[in-house]
Image (spheres, rainbow, N blue to C red):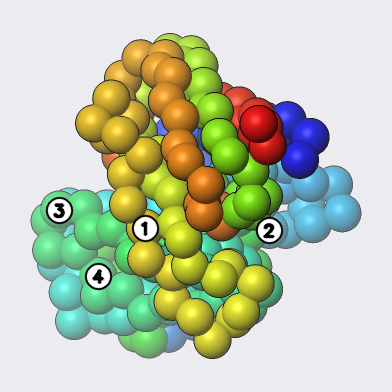
Amino acid sequence: MKPKTFTLTLAVDTDGVCASQTTAGAGSLSLNGALVGADPQLSAYYTSTTAQQLNLTSAGNLSALTFTVTGKGYSSTGVYNDSISEAITGPNATTVESSNYFLEISDISADGAVGSAVTIGVVDEAISPIIPIDSYAEVTSIQTGVTGTINYTAHYTLSNVYDASVTADWTAVSSDLTTATASQVASLAKGVTALRLIVHSGSDAGAVRMHVAQSRG
């Protein structure tokens, strides 16, 4: 397998998808945050190259409302879906977060009037795509590099990631690559089928790069 590199870069902006707004009744919110329109071909959508969780924040009690987010991204278990939807109970003078990680948002709707202003954005939790590797390689070498502030874990699996019916089981690569905050190096033995990165927290523009090289001895 040729060496691979994957980078997760955070864009933390708590009102980057929906700037502060109310609605007169049920319906779609305006996707008018600073992060919307990054892709000229999807100018009315939120799009990103990093899949991140969302936050909904309000100073009022919106817990009687359900906000439905529609787009593309990864489920809480890391499975990609080209059409993903999540129903989120509104916040009560606090912030609530999505379970899914979104790469694209085409619509956010409320099932009733949003009487107290709400903001919606992206937080500092992210997930990478599943990165398939050569399971017959004798040694898999992993190196990470960090920019800014970020806390991450690198996972591996022996599961068949090419079978959509299989739920992959993930294990941390090593203790050094569990909730790590700095660059690390590790290696894995034969049999690993795929890798991924999970970001637990970090600052805006914080990034982690993962380099993967394999040898058959």
Secondary element at tag 3 = loop
Task: Return the mark for residue 90.
Answer: 4
Q: Secondary structure at mark 2?
A: loop
Q: Residues within 10 Å of mark 2 (few under 14, many from 20)?
A: many
Q: Amino acid at mark 4?
A: Gly
Name the spot of residue 40 as percent of width and height, x first. 85, 47
Q: Position of residue 1 (x, y in %)?
A: 76, 40
Q: Which residue is mark 3?
A: 94
CA separation in Å, label 3 and label 1: 32 Å
Residue pointed to by mark 1 = 170
Crowd around label 1: few <14 · some 14–19 · many ≥20 (10 Å): some
Badge 3 crowding class, 10 Å Cα cut-off, few under 14, some 14 to 19, many 20 or more, is: few
- Report the residue at 64% width, 51% height from top: 136
The residue depicted at 49 percent of the width and 22 percent of the height is 144
Sequence-wise first label, 4 or 1: 4
Q: Residue at x 42, y 25 (%)?
A: 186
Question: Which of the two residues, 211 or 73, is positioned nearer the viewer here?
Answer: 211
- As helix, strand or loop, the secondary structure at mark 1 comes to loop
Q: Quadrant of the C terminus?
A: top right
Three-letter residue code for mark 1: Trp
Q: Which mark is residue 7?
A: none
Q: Nearer the viewer, mark 1 or mark 2?
A: 1
Among numbered discs 1 and 2, the one appearing first in the sequence: 2
Residue at mark 2: 45
Question: Which is more N-terminal, label 1 or label 3?
Answer: 3
Q: Up-down: is 19 above or below 27? A: above
Q: Amino acid at mark 2?
A: Tyr
Query: Which residue lies at the image location 61% right of the left edge and 79% below the top edge?
Result: 163
Check the image and report above or below for 198 versus 158.
above
Which quadrant of the structure image shows residue 34? top right
Image side of residue 163 versus residue 203, left or right: right
